[in-house]
Image (tube, rainbow, N blue to C red):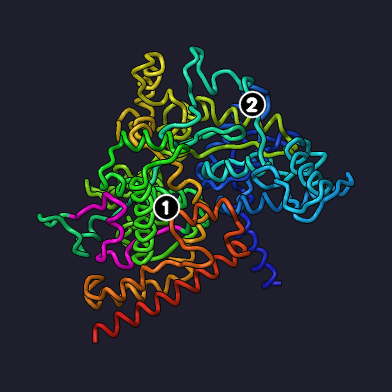
Amino acid sequence: MKNAAVFLAAALVCALPFVLRPKAGSGDWKEGDPVLVVVSPHIASIRDAFARGFSDWHRARYGSPVRVDWRNIGGTTEIMRYLKGEYSAAFRAWTRRERLPWPAGADPFAKRPPVRAEGEGEGDFSARRALWQRLRETDDPAAFTSKIDVFFGGGSYDHGAAEAEGLTVAPWPDGEWPDGLLADSDGVEMIPESLGGETWRGKAFCSAALSGFGICSNPDRLVALGVTNADGTARIPTTWRDLADPRLFREVAVTDPTKSGSIAKAFEMILHAACRERVLASGWTPEDISRLERGAAGGVPEDYQAAVEAGWLDGIRLLQGIGANARYFTDAAGKPPVDVSAGDAAAGVCIDFYGRVQAETTRFGGRDRLVYVTPKGGSSISGDPISLLRGSERRELACRFVEFVLSEEGQTLWNGRPGTPGAPSGAALRRLPVRRDFYPDPEHPAVDARARARAGTTSDDLLDGAVDAYALASAFEYEPRWTASHFAFLRSFVRAMCMDSGDELREAWGEILAAGGPEAVPEAAALLRRLPDAPFPVDWKHVTLAVRDPSLRGGLSDTDLQTEWTKFFRRSYLEARDAAARAAQ
């Protein structure tokens, strides 16, 4: 009896927080009121703020609160994998019920329409093409559905892929979006299709917030490691290349790019910055780059292209150098700035808002425990979109959620200072809104006036050129031809080069440093930096070709290709370690 009482008391203590916990965003929600199902990689504070904000907004407009049922599956990569699996199973079941033929090789989720294969009969090709079209023509939950309504958060790459694969649909036809979302009453564009070379809006996705990428560092830890200026103060890393400094061996906090689409984008920025650096060093001006890239379809000069390709290899080896200095690769994109501020790492790669939030919350007594820097010319401003999923069972409610997120009320949540009208009731989110009327705009006085009227209510000074997303985006020109098609390749390749072979990489790098550094042991350094040449050479030209033509991968699946790369790097790193050890004897 006594044991039963103890067990019951323990169970009550464990259950109490869950029983008393309010349902985020539910307000006075009751059974029978609307429920919206949203999948998101966003952190809890963002989910809570938008759940509460949308419920209040919906009650004021439509008379009832809404409960948002969040599906927290993981990062963007996991979300995409989950959605693809759900839609694949649901669509195949529907085609069976409809008795639609499914020939060998059919892939309704391919990003491009099927092309007739050599020797393929007209019947099989027509059936493959019909499946591809039926998927994109059907937006009826009675046919097939993922049972989720909205995909909220993640990078433009993944939302663009979801659109191309047929997983998402436009919430409204062109020209029928709610008033005030894409343009204000004067016709001024509020959410551009693109800026600085980055796509912010597609047919079926629209950026809800904006992000840049940069470096967080701990001044005290840098001083302890001897990374200092002439006066003994910390030498704050301001370029991506600074993260490969040998003094930062095992001191750089990094996130797994296969788990975070945003960090994968940061890695692409490192590659892109290296291309630009080499092109500029070769004597080409920014004006030359713009002129040549805009007309790239007609070809570019050989020496210019050679500079792009050399810069690309520089970037790959820089990513390898950062991996060699890595303390860890984490699944959580918010972990590096937390650990850096605590002194558990000296520096890290991070998303801008994580860096700014951690810098603000850890500042004490006028001392900075963490400094965040966006490398000059090292990051574009990319979108963090929202998309309506195909076959939504609550389509009207889902469209209202999209409308809220893109409205002034929803946008205020991203950077509103707690205690001011429309701001989150909890901690500040410190994200950059996408709407133009949150930033200075001298060309449009009315837009500029709205931005300045908000100046005292935002957590960050959005009027400051160092924070103004539109100014930052305009100052950086993203050249898609250089790196855009390599995004998926980068995720897999960096994992093979720096993570799955990470122990061997850091062991080899440690031996090289102990032997006096790369210059002292050139043979070992060359072995460390060796890149795979099978099933195709890893360089700009061959990677670009392999992305377009999967047959060049020698019949290897993505998983098999990553495994082969991992084996290659492990062999190379072990050889580099041994060569460095021999040279040091």
**Viewer-nearest of labels 1 and 2?**
1
Residue at the image point whose x is 60% and y is 65% from the top: 554
In the image, is residue 244 part of the stretch drawn in magenta? yes
Mark 1 residue element: helix
Residue at the image point whose x is 49% and y is 36% from the top: 199
298 vs 35, left or right, is: left
The single residue placed furthest to the bottom in the displayed view is: 585
Give 217 or 482, whichever is nearer the viewer. Answer: 482
Residues rendered magenta in the picture: 234-255
Residue bearing mark 2: 59
CB-based contact (under 8 Å), mark 1 and mark 2: no
440 vs 414, left or right, is: left
Which amino acid type is shown beneath numbered disc 1?
Answer: Phe
Residue at the image point whose x is 58% and y is 42% from the top: 159
184 vs 248, left or right, is: right
Q: Say if 575 sits above or below 460 in the image.
A: below
Q: Measured from the top left, where is residue 375 in percent x and y? A: 30, 46
Q: Measured from the top left, where is residue 329 in percent x and y? A: 44, 63
Q: Measured from the top left, where is residue 237 in percent x and y? A: 26, 53
Q: In the rendering, which numbered label is found on residue 267?
A: 1
In the image, is residue 22 part of the stretch drawn in magenta? no
Sequence-first tag of 1 and 2: 2
Disc 2 crowd, CA 10 A, few/some/many (<14, 14-19, 20+): some
Which amino acid type is shown beneath numbered disc 2?
Answer: Arg
Residue at the image point whose x is 25% and y is 61% from the top: 221
373 vs 446, left or right, is: left
Mark 2 residue element: helix
Give 321 or 285, whichever is nearer the viewer. Answer: 285
In this rendering, does residue 388 appear at all? yes
